Image (cartoon, rainbow, N blue to C red):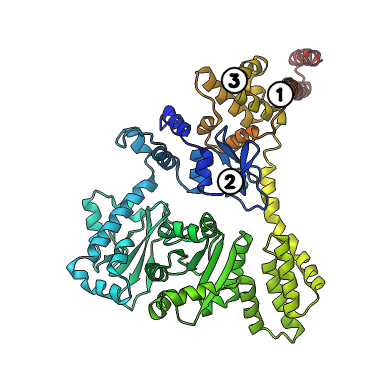
Amino acid sequence: MAGRIPENILEDILGRLDLVELISGYIPLKKSGRNFKANCPFHHEKTASFMVSPDRQIYHCFGCGESGNAFKFLMRHERMDFPEAVELLAKKAGVNLPKQDSPEVSRAASLSSQLYKVNELAVSFYENNLYAESAAATREYLSKRGISPKTAKEFHLGFAASGWDHLINFLRLKNISLALMEKAGLILPKEGGGYYDRFRNRIIFPVFDIRLRPIGFGARVLDKSLPKYLNSPETPVYTKGRNLFGLNLSKDCIRDADSAIIVEGYLDFIIPYQEGIKNIVASQGTALTLEQIRLLKRYTNKAVMVYDGDTAGQIATLRSLDMLIEEGMNVKIVPLPKGLDPDALVRLKGAASFKEMIDQAAGLFDYKLEVLKSRHDMKEAHGKSRIASEMLLTINKFDNAILRAEYSKRLSEEINIPENCILEELNKLKPNTLPQEKLSSSIAGSTPLINPAEKMLIKFMLEEKELIEKIMGELEPADFQDTRTAKVVSIMLDLFSRGKSIAPSLLLNYFSEDDASQLLCESIFMPELLEEEREKALNDCIRRIKVERLKSRRERLHVQIKSAQSSGDEKRLSGLIREFHELIKKGD
Ligand SMILES: [Zn+2]
């Protein structure tokens, strides 16, 4: 990973930042001894196994194995590539990066950053169009829909005129290649060759990510004969279901309010937001994805879902909300009257009445129960059983034993079935949720297989540079049986011999493979030894590795001897046998 951006610059950036501060901007960290702890942001878990070391400036999750330094955290959490993470942290740290036009760095400039640039140009192109004389009717339309000129500006709303190549011509003048325009999803290839603009005669809603970069577009039709909305296709910077529309504007308000209102469409977001309901996001689809939930969880764990009455009553919708519970979120539902969306509701009845509905929202459990009761006949055993099995799915998503007990009790009362029957059914369900957990622990299980002595020696060398020479006086990198440990050791030695820093957070820049960096971080987070235990432990580890080394040499010789025997190579055989005896003597 290092190499493109000079090592000393990476070192400078990492040296000026605090990883604990950086990570606590995303998830709440709790002090735990010398380290900090949290529920891992990279896998679903119930007890915190994500550790951050302020001394070492690295993090490691004992659940899923995710680990690294500040760059890696941003790459994973914000889905940045390495140059982007470096750029962002350099800015934070006040470190100047080599000029953009230096060939090294411009080569590193990723496709993503080129796409953001193209999108940015398109945003400004469409936005300018909206204020052209020819777009008077469009502006009129926006004002009829209740969007003020100020709001239009705030959201960078735009207009794509009818015509096939307005955007193409504009971007060409800016020296943007057709290939890049196509990658950005802004143009489409014609059948007979050539390209045409994807968005024509539509109002444009640019979509920004939380770092305010334009990632895609939604386009609403003016001409009623066409589909109402057209969105950007998936591109390297835009994946449907990974983003929440408007979060770039509302995230601070959501954090302050400790609650997020979730609506579906662009206008369902824009109109309430304009009228002062600021803790809101739009999912751009009926079902929330896990990624959207996790994105939102950075700011709050309370969500109020606003659906039109039809959608909200659907079991599929309700089931998809169970996922929010599973992610530890507190979910409420607001069903709107049929055919009324938040946009229309706020325009017709005002923001106050929308707020009132939000305040009175029922919890998912109660709402789902009401829906089911209205659908199934409670007087019949089958009806009861249908209600119970559907509700048990929801109850089963709660981690918290108290909530599970409380809701089981409520369900028993509501459908008049003894509580122990409900609990019995609930217990039957529990194993279904286990494979997920087993899966993550088996991922973690892949590293502990590494000889603990090898990991311990890495820890020793990172903690006390003086020990490097002692250890390497007795062992070679190749003596480490695991290829990952061997790789970490040889890179460490190389840096050390060149007088470079081997601080773990810097060392990590040299590994692009996850398993090597995982191993490194895991070693560091191994339990601390008491001062008086250190020397004995060190010698034990060295001895154990030597024993392993002997054992594997013996095994290798054994195989060689066998093959010499079967091929009848007497001369080679006697040489090998001599070697074998010498080895055994050494072992004693
Ligand atoms: Zn994890």
Give me the residue at 39% from left, 43% from top: 110
Give me the residue at 45% from left, 43% from top: 81
Q: Say whether mark 3 is within 8 Å of ligand 1.
A: no
- Report if residue 467 is visible in the image: yes
> Which residue occupies the extreme left position in the image?
133
Q: Which residue is mark 2?
A: 29
54 sits left or right of 573 in the view: left
Q: Distance between the Cα atoms at labels 2 and 1?
A: 28 Å
Q: Which residue is mark 1?
A: 531
Q: Is residue 381 above or below residue 79?
A: below
Which amino acid type corresponds to the residue marked 3 in the rendered image?
Lys
- The answer to which of 323 and 227 lies nearer the viewer is 323
Residue 336 in picture, x, y percent from top left: 50, 78
Quarter in which the C terminus is drawn: top right
Residue 38 in picture, x, y percent from top left: 61, 47
Of discs 2 and 3, which sits in the foreground? 2
Which amino acid type corresponds to the residue marked 2 in the rendered image?
Leu
Element class at badge 3: helix
530 sits left or right of 39 in the view: right
Give me the residue at 70% from left, 55% from top: 435
Give me the residue at 50% from left, 18% from top: 499
Q: Which residue is mark 3?
A: 465
Residue 246 in picture, x, y percent from top left: 41, 61
Whichever of callouts 2 and 3 sits on the residue coming sooner in the sequence is 2
Whichever of callouts 2 and 1 sits on the residue coming sooner in the sequence is 2
389 sits left or right of 69 in the view: right
Q: Callout 3 environment at 10 Å: few (<14), some (14 to 19), or many (20+)?
A: few
Q: Are marks 2 and 1 in contact (CB under 8 Å)?
A: no
Q: Are marks 2 and 3 in contact (CB under 8 Å)?
A: no
Element class at badge 2: loop
Of discs 3 and 1, which sits in the foreground? 1
- The answer to which of 570 and 128 lies nearer the viewer is 128
